[in-house]
Amino acid sequence: MRTLELAGIHVPVIGQGTWRMGEERSRHTKEVAALRLGIELGMTLIDTAEMYAEGGAEEVVGEAIAGRRDQVFLVSKVYPHNASCLGIPQACERSLRRLNTDYIDLYLLHWRGEYPLEETVEAFERLRESGKIDRWGVSNFDLDDMEELASPTCTTNQVLYNLEERGIEFDLLPWSQHQRMPVMAYCPIGQGGSMLANSTLKQIAARHEATPAQVALAWILRQNGVIAIPKAVRPEHVQLNAQAAQLRLEIGDLEALDQAFRAPQRKQRLAMV
Ligand SMILES: NC(=O)c1ccc[n+]([C@@H]2O[C@H](COP(=O)([O-])OP(=O)(O)OC[C@H]3O[C@@H](n4cnc5c(N)ncnc54)[C@H](OP(=O)(O)O)[C@@H]3O)[C@@H](O)[C@H]2O)c1
């Protein structure tokens, strides 16, 4: 698995998302197995949040990483309504209990809420000092939010980024690359939706003996400083996603994708789901 450096530690360029996991007891065993398979295949960065199934996804992750905590780079997120000096340590304790661990590698503010950023940052820093988290970051922050945050200890910004949603390429992505702050791309394969049926994407995939989802991931990873976190429960999807890190697109492929999915020509408001 290819890696990149995030605040002094090497993490895989493809991790595993967990949104929609933990919602149905009947899918629990398959979800745990998928995450374990992903870890074995090198996708050791796991992204979750207290929001996902209201803690249910963190419980799935907790079971999946039991006995292999040291191999995993664990990312979780706090709700904005918990992002206060009082709320963050309590939310973090609840997440730690569900994740069945005593530290989170990277703790993110899920999106910007009503608490002042200074207060959230102070609470994150206190958690870092106490060893409950190793690093912190943000999610769904546009460039103006990042400039306002202006924190040298923020280690990532997790945002929507895929072939259909290229808005960050205009400003946020170059800014992040200049700051040497990796961006974490969520919904990298468009939630498995219509994007994957695009004819150009399908043609390129056929040429590489790959799948459209793999090409979509390789396209995200064509540049430095970006981590993709696809979510997959089906084992064949997990395997294909891990293999996508090896797929190198050619100039002609990238040009064709630029025709099919246009790069932004002006500032676009940050897209979110
Ligand atoms: N910070 C935020 O606000 C935010 C927002 C959204 C998402 N996220 C994070 O980002 C992660 C990824 O986003 P997402 O889950 O919304 O969407 P996604 O990863 O783009 O797509 C997931 C869907 O694609 C399918 N899939 C996975 N691999 C595939 C492959 N190789 N070929 C075809 N289909 C494939 C999955 O099916 P199966 O599961 O059936 O295999 C699932 O239905 C989330 O799980 C979450 O951790 C963060």
Image (spheres, rainbow, N blue to C red):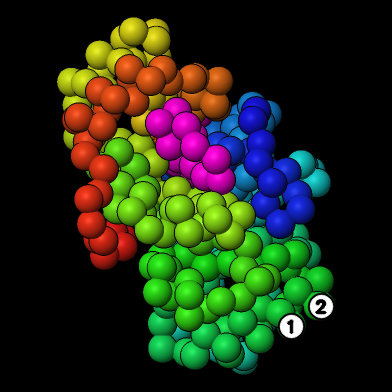
Please report the bounds of the magenta region as a residue range.
217-238
* Residue in the picture at 56% in, 45% down: 225
**Of residues 8 and 102, the one drawn nearer to the viewer in this rendering:** 8
- Whether tag 2 and tag 1 are in contact, CB under 8 A, the answer is yes
For the N terminus, the quadrant is top right
Q: Amino acid at mark 1?
A: Arg
Res. 176 in view = yes
Task: Identify the residue under disc 2.
Answer: 130
Q: Secondary structure at mark 1?
A: helix
The local secondary structure at tag 2 comes to loop
Up-down: is 257 above or below 71? above
Q: Is residue 65 left or right of residue 35?
A: right
Q: Quadrant of ligand 1?
A: top left
Q: Is residue 79 visible?
A: no
Q: CA distance from mark 2 to mark 1?
A: 6 Å
Q: Is residue 261 left or right of residue 174?
A: left
Q: What's the mark number on residue 126?
A: 1
**In the image: residue 190, left or right of residue 172:** left
x and y, in percent, of residue 263 in the image: 26, 43
Say which quarter of the image contains residue 75: bottom right
Give the side of residue 42 with respect to residue 20, left or right.
Answer: right
Question: Magenta stretch containing residue 233, yes or no?
Answer: yes
Report x, y in % for residue 255. Answer: 29, 25
- Residue name at image x 45 percent, y 41 percent: 231
User: Which three-letter amino acid code belongs to the residue tagged 2?
Assistant: Ser
